[in-house]
Image (cartoon, rainbow, N blue to C red):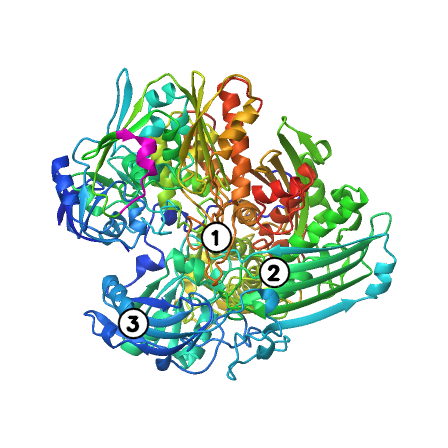
Amino acid sequence: MNIQFRLNGKNVQADVKPDVILLDLVRELGCYSVKRGCETANCGLCTVWLDGKPVLSCSTLAVRVDGRHVTTLEGLQKEAEEFGMFLAAEGGEQCGFCSPGFIMNVLAMEKELDHPDEDEVREYLSGNLCRCSGYMSQLRAVKQYLDRKNGVGGNV
Amino acid sequence: MFRAEDYVKVDSLAEAYELCQKRSSLVVGGMVWLKMTNVTKRTIVDLSGLGLDQIEETGEEFRIGCMSTLRQIETHQGLNQYFGGIFRECTRHIVGVQMRNCATVGGSIYSRFGFSDILTCMMALDTYVELYHGGIMPLSEFAKRPVRRDDKDILVRVIIKKDGRKAAYTTQRNSSTDFPLLACCVSRRGGNWYVAVGARPSKAQVVTITDDGYDSLAQLAREAADSFTYGTNTRGSSRYRRQLASVYIRRLMERLTGRSVTIG
Amino acid sequence: MENLQMRNFRIVGAPVIKKDAKALVTGKPVFTDDLALKDCLVVKVLRSPYAHALITEIDCAVAAKIPGIECIITHKDVPRKRFTMAGQTYPEPSPYDRLILDERLRFVGDAVAVVAGETEAAVDHAMRLIRVKYQVLEPVLDMHDSKDGDILVHPEDSWESHCDVGADNRRNLCASGKETHGDLEEAFAGCTHVIERVYHTKANQQAMMETFRAYTYMDVYGRLNIVASTQVPFHTRRILAHALDVPKSRIRVIKPRIGGGFGAKQTVVAEVYPAIVTMKTGKPAKIIYSRYESQIASSPRHEMEVRVKLGCDDRGVLQAMDVYTLSNTGAYGEHGPTTVGLSGHKSIPLYRTPKAFRFAYDVVYTNRMSAGAYRGYGATQGIFAVESAVSELAAQMGMDPVAMRELNLVKEGDIMPAYYGEPANSCALDRCVAKVKEMIGWDEKYPRRAVSGTKVRGVGLAMAMQGSAISGVDVASVCVKVNDDGFYSLMIGAADMGTGCDTTLAQVAAESLGCELEDIVVYGTDTDISPYDSGSYASSTAYLTGMAVVKTCEALKKKILHKAARYLECREDELEFDGKRVYKLSCEEDGTRKEMTIKDIGNRVMCSNEDALQVTESHSSPVSPPPFMAGAAEVEVDTETGDVKLIRFVAAVDCGTPLNINLARVQTEGGLAQGIGMALYEDVTYSETGRVHENSFMQYKVPSRQDVGNVQVEFECSYEPTGPYGAKSIGEIVINTPSPAIANAVYNAVGVRIRELPITAEKVFNGMNGLD
C-alpha cells in the first residue's frame, strides 16, 4: 500500500505492507531516535506523536498514519535540547536509550497538562520505563524545566 | 508476529461487516493486543474513517464509539462527573498515557479480557453494547459469551444509561502499572447494589445485591464476594482473591454510603 | 553540595554534564542498531522448547531453500572445543561448558540452530520449517535436587574446569568451598541468643532497556569485526577466538554507546551467533535479541538460598556467624564460581565483632536458564540474608535493629578477616547509619505508627558493602597523549554503559593535568586501539581505571616537563607545570620568567621531535577497598489486604570521594530502584516443564516511576588512599540495601517476616493471618 503522511514537517511517501508497524517504518526513514525496548507495549521507548498526541509506535500500524502527522524527536530537536539540558544537568540521561521516548512524552505532557503536581507528572510519565536512573533525577529535571517555563524560580 | 496481506479503511459499517464474514478478516481496534499475537490474517478492517471515535452525551445516556480511546474515556468530563470519577480510576493504571491513546474501548470490550479494568467498570453500570448485526444487548449478556473466531459481528458502540446510580471503583495491583490482581466496581441505586468483580483472574461478572437495611455492609460485601468464583495464577491465589473481594467491595460500599473509614 | 565533608577538588566531584549528554537527549543514532550496516544479514536463533533434550535429528533442507536464506548452522557445523561465555580474566574460573551449538539442550530456550537471511520474514519462515527430532529427557529443575542427583546437566567428557573452584560435572557442581575462621562451636556456645534462618532470592533480570545485540563484518584486512553492546570488549575478543577456534589477532571488538548493562553484558550472550555467520558467509550479520529472548535466554542473577546461623551475647554483641549458600547457576556455569563467594565475603565483614565465622557454599547446575552477572554479583543475595538475620536476632532480643548494628558494625581501621584479611582503610559506615537514621526519622518512627484503622507504617534499615575491582586480578590501562594546541586524548579500555565513566574519567584526567574538561577528548573502546582493560564490571571503573588515569597523567606530566626542559634550556627540577604552562620557578636576572604554554609545546612537538608526548600505563590493585552504605525504608502496609506501599527510601553512601556528585547520586538512585524492584515487584516463576512465566515486561514488572516512592540520597565521604582522589567504587553496592531494609520495615509494621523475595501483598496477608 502506498501511504503519504507528514513526518517531522516533511511530506513523505512510503510503500508498506499492511502489517508493518510505525516503529519500523520511521526507523527505516532515518528516525533512529525511536527505539524498541519490548514487544508488549510496556516500555514507552517507541513513543512518537500522531497528530500531536503521544502514542506507541510499536502498536500503531503504518497504514494508519496515511494523511496524518507523525513527529519524532528528530523533528523536535530544539525542544529536546532545551529540556534535555535540564535532564543532563541532573545526570538523568544515563544510557540514553529511554531518553527519546521519555522526552517525547515530557513534551507532550507539557502541552496537555496545566501546572501538574508531582503525582500528576509521575502518572503521566508512568508509561516510560527507565532502568538506569531510578527516576528521581528525571523528576527533578521535569520540575525545574516546568518551573522555568512557568517563570518560577531562579537558575538551574 | 502479527501478519496481514490487505488493509481496508472502510467507508461504512456495512462494508466492514461484509468483509468480516470471511474468517480471514479482522477488525482492528487499537492494535495493542493484536500485535503481540501470532495471528495471520488476510485482511485488516479499519473502522477509523467512520467517526466512531466520539463520546456523545445526551440527557439519557452516554454513547461511546468503539474507536474512542481509553484516554478519551479517562479524561471525559461528562463520564467522570456523572459516575464519580470511576472512568479515570479504571484507566489511569493501564500501562501509560501513550498506550491509552492507542487502545480503544471497542477493542477492550470486544476482547472480554479477564484483566480488563474497563469491562469490570462498565459491568457495574447500566451498560449495553450495540452490535452491528446482533443489535443492542446488555453488556453482562455480551460478556458471558465466549470469544469465538467465527464471531463475525462488529461492536459499534457502548451505551451507558444515566440512571442516577452512584459508582466507585478500585483494584489491587502488585505494581502500579501492572494488570490488576483483582478489580472491583460497585454501584448503588435505590436499594440495590450492583457489584462487578473482574480479574478473578477470569473476566468480570456482575451480581445484584438487595440492601434491605438489616445486614451490615461487611455482610453484604461478603455475600457479593462469595457469588463469584476465583482462580489462581502467578499474580495471586483464589483464596486471596476471595478475601480481597470481600474487603474491597465493603470499602467501595462504605465510600458510596459516606461511611468510609478507609480509602481502598 | 550538602554535607559532603569531602576535600574540594577543582573538577573531581563537580556535577559536570556528561560528554555524550547532548547526543543522547537529542536522540542521535549512536547505539549498535543505529550504526549497523544496512545490508547485514538478519540472524536469529531457534530455541529449545524443552528443558532437557537431545537433538536426534535436525533437518534444515526445506528451510534452507527459502528465498533469501543465506545459511543455517547446526551443532554439526560448529567447533567441538568447549569454552565459557563469562567475561572474566583468563584463565576464567567459570567452567568451559559451552559449545556454540550443542546436541544436548539444557534449558527451555537453549540454542538449537542459527539462521541467517536477507530479511526477517525469510528468517522467521525458515525457522518454522526446520525439522528437529528431540529425545526429551527428564530435567533437574530444583536446585535442591541437583548436587549428587541422578540427572546430570553436563555429563560430557569434554567439560573442563581450569581453576580450582571445587567444580565437578559428575556431581552437578559448578563450584564448592568452605572457609572457617576461629572456633565456631566455642563461639556459638558462648551465645545467649542464637537463630538459624533460610533466605531465598530469585533469578532476577537486569532488564536493561537495550537488549543484547551485535553486528559483525569482515574488514579490509580479512579480520572479523564485531560492534557489540558489551561491557567486556577484550574478553569478548578472547572468548570468540576460543569459540570460533581462530587466533585472537583475527578479531576486533568495538563498543559504541550502550543502553545499559548492569552485568548482563558481562557475558558474551549474543555475539557468537552473528560472528559465526559472518565467518561462514563472509557477509555482515546482525542479531538483535527480543525482550522475550532477553528474559528467557540471557544471564540473570543466580538464584540463591542462603542459610544463616547467627549468635550474640546478652548485650547483643555478635559472637558467631555461619553462612551456607546454595547457588543455582542454571544450565551453564558463567559467573557461578565467583558470584557465590561474594554472598559471604561481602556480607559477613559488615560486622567486626564475631569471634568465629564459617562460610560454605555449593553452586549447582540445573536445567534452567544460565545465570550470570548482575549488579551486586552475589553480595546482594548474601546481604539480604545476613542483614535480615541480624534484624531477626535483634527482634528476638527485643533490641532495636539499628542499635544492634551500631554495636557491631565494622569501623575504619579494622582488619576484616572475612574480607581476605584486608583493612578497612576508609570506612564511614557508622556515619552512614547515623545519617540514614536521621533522614528516615528512625527514632520517631521505629517500629511502627498507625496511620488509620487499616494502615500501618513501619521503618527498616540495612547496611551494605561491596568491593572496588577484583584485587590482584583486574587490570586497567589508560593512554593519554598531548595533541596540537595542547588538548589531550584519553584512551580507555573500560566500557561506559551509560554510567558516564567516559566523563568521570576525563574529570580525573583534567584534575591530574590541571586543565579544563573540554581539553580532554575521550576515546571509547576498540580492542585494536584501546589499551587493555578487563572491562566494566566488579565496580572497577572509577577505582581502578580512575587510578590508571592518575598514574598515566602523572607520567605524562613528567614527559611534558622533560620536553619543556629541553625547549627552555633548563633542568626539569627547576620547572613547574600548572596545567596551562610550564614555567621556571625562579626568575631570570632581568626579571623575566622562562615559560612555555602547553599549547605551544603541543604544537612544537609536531616538528623535529623525538619525545612522543604519549604515555600508556596499566594499574592493578592488591586491595579492593569496600564502599559502604546504609539504606532505610518506610513502608505502609494495609492490615486488611497485606498490600505494601513503599513511601520513602533513603540512603547514605560512602564511596570515598564521589568523582561526579550528580552521576554518583544517579547511580545510587538507579541502583536503589533496581533493588526496590527485586524486593517488591520482580518475580521469577516457572512452569512444571521449566518454562519461565515472566518472559516479557508484561509479566516481569520492573519498577515504574510510581513504584519507587520518594528516594533520597546523601553522601558520607571517607578518603581511600589507594583510589583516585580518594574514590572507591559505587556501581554495585547501590542495589544491596532495599531488599533487607524493606523486609525489615514490613516486619516492624505488621510483624510478618518475609524471607523469600519478592515481598508481595499475598505473602504479607498470609503472614498476618497465619496462613503460611
Q: Nearer the viewer, residue C76 or A45?
A: C76
Disc 2 sits on a residue from what chain?
A: C
Instruction: Find numbered disc 1 in the image and state the secondary structure of the residue it sits on.
Output: loop
Residue C612: in sight, yes or no? Answer: no
Quick one: label 3 or label 2, which is nearer the N terminus? 3
Which mark's residue is nearer the viewer, 3 or 1? 3
**Kind of residue at disc 1:** Gly
Instruction: Find numbered disc 3 in the image and state the secondary structure of the residue it sits on.
Output: loop
Q: Nearer the viewer, residue C578 or C550?
A: C550
**Residue annotated with mark 1:** C500
Would residue C274 appear left or right of B65 to someone viewing this image?
Answer: right
Residue C602 lies, in percent from the top left, at 43, 61
Mark 3 Cα shell of 10 Å, populated few (<14), some (14-19), many (≥20): some
- Report the magenta residues as a range: B137-148
Task: Indicate which disc residue C304 carries.
Answer: 2
Residue at the location (58% across, 57% down)?
A: C376
